[in-house]
Image (tube, helix red, strand yellow):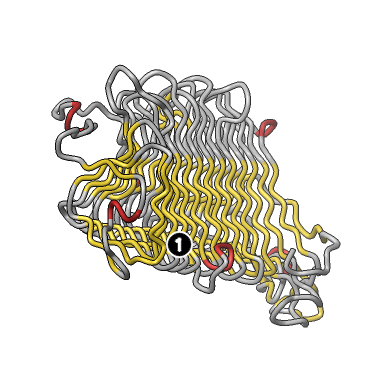
C-alpha cells in the first residue's frame, strides 16, 4: 500500500507562496531587541509568558534556567544572521508561537543560523522552531532533561535553505522520551546538486536519563537532490516505533545520486506500515545512482509489519546499484510480517543488487513478505541475501530473491546448539515452505547463482515408512513403490526442493555451536 504513496519532498517548487511567506524580515519597529533573560521575561521568578515579538542579539544566551517559559500564539522570538541559546527550566511553544533563526536581507545571507534550546525539564513544541535561510540551511539543537514532544497541533522543526542549497541539521537529546507528531524537515532543495541534511535523536540512558522511547508519527525528511541523501541517526535505550505516517526519506532524488543513511539502535524496534527510504535516484532511476544504507540494531524484537518497506534500491552504475540493509536483534526475534518488504535491488538496466542481512534468535519471513537483491535489466548482477537465525523460517508465500542475468547468493543459516539462549538442547532449525520462493537464478543455468542451507548442528530426519532410515528429503524415503515422508529433519523444506532455483547446497554444517550467531 505504501508503494503507491510518494514521500513528500519539501524542496519541490512552492509557486503559490511568496518569498515573504517563507522568510520573515526583521520587524524593526515592532520587535524589541533583547540579549538577556530579564529583558525578555522582566520580573519573572518561576514562569514567563512571551506574547510579543523579540529580536535576540546575535550570539546571545538567554539564561532563563529558573523559569518555565511559554512562547504563546502571539509570541515570536527571532535571531538574524547568527546564533542564540535559550536556557530554560522547561519550554512550551504554543500553536502559532515561533522561535526562528533567519537571514536579515536577501542580499546578505549569513549561512550561520543556529538555535540551541537547553532545558532542565520538558520541551513541548506545538508551534514552530525553524532555522531557514534563503540560500543556506541552519542548525537546531534541543537538549532536554525530560521529554521532547512535537505536538500534533504544531508545524514541526525545519532547517533548510528556501531558495536552494544543502539540507540543515537537527539534534534532539532527551533524558526521557521523544514523541514526534509533526515533521522534521532538513531536506535539500530540489535544484542543482544538493546534499540532504542530518537528524540525530538520542534518548534515555544515551541522553543521561531513565526514559528512552521514540515514537515517530510524521515524516522525517533528510533527502538530497542529484547528490547524496542525508542521515538519520537514532540511539535510544527504550522502544522505537515508526507508525503509519512516520516515514523517513533519506533518499536522493534525481539521476546520478546516492541514497543516504538510516541507523537505529534501541531495545526494540517496530516499523508499522511506513516507508524507510535510502533510495538512490528516487523518482528517476538513472545512471550512476546507488542505494544507501539502513542499519537496525536492537537487543529485543524487531518487527516490520503492515506493508512497511525498507527501501535501499538504486539505479544503474559501475558499482553497486542496490544499497545495504542490516537488521540485527541480539537476544530477540526479527519478524518480517505479511506484505512487508526489504528491497536492495537495482532498478535500471545493468545495475547490481545490493546486500541484505537479517540476524536474530528467530528470523521469521511471513507469507507475502519479500526480501529482494535482484540485479537490473538484461545485463545486471544480483546481490546477496543472508538470513541468520537459531531458527530461520521462510513461510508459505514469502519471497527471497536475488535474480538477474547473473544470479546472486542466498544463504539461510540455522545456528542452534548448546548455547541456544532459550533452549540449550535445541538443534538448529531451518524451515523453507514448499510454497515459498527462494530464487537466485540467472538468465541461463550457467549464470545461476548459489543457494546454501547451513546448520551448525545437523540432525537428519527419519522416514515414516522405515524409521531406521535417516533422511533430509522425502525422496530419501522412496523404496520402490513404498514412499514415505521425511520427518524431523532440521533442514525442513517440506520434503521437496521445488521452491528453490537453483537447488540448494544442503547439509553444510557451519561449525558454529554458539547462538546467537
- Is residue 16 visible in the rendered structure shown here? yes
Left or right: 368 in relation to 428:
left
Residue appearing at x 79%, y 75% in the figure? 419
Front residue of 56 and 501: 56
Percent from the top left, x then y, of residue 407? 63, 36
- Is residue 249 visible in the rendered structure shown here? no
Front residue of 475 and 258: 258
Residue appearing at x 41%, y 53% in the figure? 117
State the image quarter where residue 405 is shown. Answer: top right
Percent from the top left, x then y, of residue 111? 42, 27
Percent from the top left, x then y, of residue 105? 27, 23
Rendered position, 344 above or below 148: above
Q: Residues within 10 Å of mark 1 (few under 14, many from 20)?
A: many
Left or right: 11 in relation to 377:
left
Q: Which residue is mark 1?
A: 144
Residue appearing at x 58%, y 47% in the figure? 325
Rendered position, 28 above or below 300: above
Front residue of 260 and 22: 22
| Label 1 element class | strand
Residue appearing at x 48%, y 41% in the figure? 198
Residue farthest toward the right in the current orientation of the protein: 511
Left or right: 511 in relation to 247:
right
Figure label count: 1
State the image quarter where residue 423 is shown. Answer: bottom right
Percent from the top left, x then y, of residue 280? 48, 31
State the image quarter where residue 15 is shown. Answer: top left
Q: Quadrant of the C terminus?
A: bottom right
Amino acid at each position: 500500500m505504501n508503494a503507491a504513496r510518494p514521500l513528500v519532498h519539501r524542496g519541490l517548487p512552492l509557486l503559490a507562496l511568496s518569498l515573504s511567506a517563507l522568510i520573515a524580515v526583521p520587524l524593526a519597529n515592532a520587535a524589541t531587541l533583547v540579549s538577556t533573560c530579564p529583558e525578555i521575561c522582566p520580573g519573572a521568578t518561576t514562569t514567563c509568558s512571551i506574547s510579543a515579538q523579540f529580536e535576540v542579539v546575535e550570539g546571545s544566551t538567554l539564561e532563563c534556567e529558573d523559569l518555565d517559559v511559554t512562547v504563546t500564539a502571539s509570541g515570536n522570538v527571532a535571531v538574524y544572521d547568527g546564533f542564540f541559546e535559550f536556557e530554560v527550566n522547561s519550554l512550551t511553544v504554543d500553536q502559532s508561537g515561533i522561535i526562528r533563526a533567519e537571514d536579515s536581507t536577501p542580499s546578505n545571507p549569513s549561512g550561520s543560523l543556529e538555535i540551541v534550546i537547553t532545558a532542565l525539564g520538558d520541551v513541548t513544541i506545538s508551534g514552530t522552531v525553524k532555522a531557514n535561510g534563503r540560500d543556506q540551511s541552519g542548525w537546531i539543537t534541543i537538549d532536554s532533561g525530560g521529554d521532547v514532544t512535537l505536538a500534533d497541533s504544531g508545524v514541526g522543526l525545519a532547517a533548510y535553505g528556501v531558495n536552494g542549497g544543502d539540507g540543515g541539521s537537527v539534534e534532539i537529546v532527551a533524558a526521557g522520551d521523544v514523541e514526534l507528531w509533526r515533521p522534521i524537515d532538513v531536506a535539500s532543495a530540489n535544484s542543482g546538486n544538493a546534499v540532504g541534511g542530518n537528524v540525530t535523536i538520542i534518548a534515555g540512558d544515551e541522553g543521561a536519563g531513565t526514559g528512552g522511547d521514540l515514537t515517530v508519527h510524521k515524516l522525517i525528511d533528510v533527502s538530497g537532490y542529484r547528490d547524496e541523501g542525508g542521515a538519520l541517526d537514532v540511539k535510544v535505550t527504550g522502544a522505537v516505533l515508526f507508525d503509519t505516517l512516520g516515514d523517513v526519506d533519506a533518499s536522493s532524488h534525481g539521476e546520478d545520486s546516492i541514497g543516504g543513511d538510516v541507523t537505529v539502535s534501541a531495545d526494540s524496534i517496530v516499523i508499522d506500515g511506513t516507508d524507510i527510504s535510502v533510495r538512490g535516484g528516487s523518482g528517476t532511476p538513472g545512471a550512476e545512482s546507488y542505494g544507501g544504507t539502513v542499519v537496525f540494531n536492537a537487543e529485543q524484537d524487531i518487527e516490520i509489519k503492515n506493508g512497511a518497506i525498507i527501501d535501499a534500491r538504486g539505479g544503474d552504475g559501475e558499482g553497486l546499484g542496490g544499497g545495504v540493509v542490516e537488521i540485527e536483534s541480539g537476544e530477540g526475534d526479527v519478524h518480517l510480517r505479511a506484505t512487508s518488504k526489504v528491497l536492495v535491488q537495482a532498478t535500471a538496466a545493468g545495475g547490481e543488487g545490493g546486500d541484505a542481512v537479517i540476524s536474530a534468535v528467530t528470523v521469521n519471513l511471513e507469507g507475502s513478505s519479500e526480501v529482494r537483491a535482484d540485479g537490473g535489466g538484461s545485463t545486471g548482477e544480483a546481490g546477496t541475501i543472508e538470513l541468520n537465525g537459531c531458527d530461520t523460517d521462510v513461510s508459505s508465500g514469502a519471497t527471497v530473491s536475488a535474480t538477474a542475468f547473473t544470479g546472486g547468493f542466498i544463504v539461510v543459516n540455522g545456528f542452534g546448539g548448546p548455547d541456544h539462549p532459550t533452549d540449550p538442547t535445541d538443534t538448529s532449525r531451518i524451515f523453507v515452505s514448499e510454497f515459498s520462493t527462494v530464487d537466485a537464478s540467472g538468465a541461463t543455468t550457467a549464470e545461476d547463482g548459489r543457494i546454501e542451507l547451513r546448520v551448525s548442528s545437523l540432525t537428519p530426519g527419519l522416514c515414516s515408512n522405515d524409521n531406521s532410515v535417516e533422511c533430509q528429503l522425502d525422496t530419501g524415503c522412496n523404496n520402490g513403490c513404498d514412499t514415505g515422508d521425511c520427518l524431523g529433519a532440521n533442514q525442513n523444506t517440506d520434503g521437496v526442493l521445488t521452491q528453490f532455483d537453483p537447488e540448494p547446497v544442503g547439509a553444510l554444517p557451519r561449525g558454529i555451536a554458539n547462538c546467537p550467531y
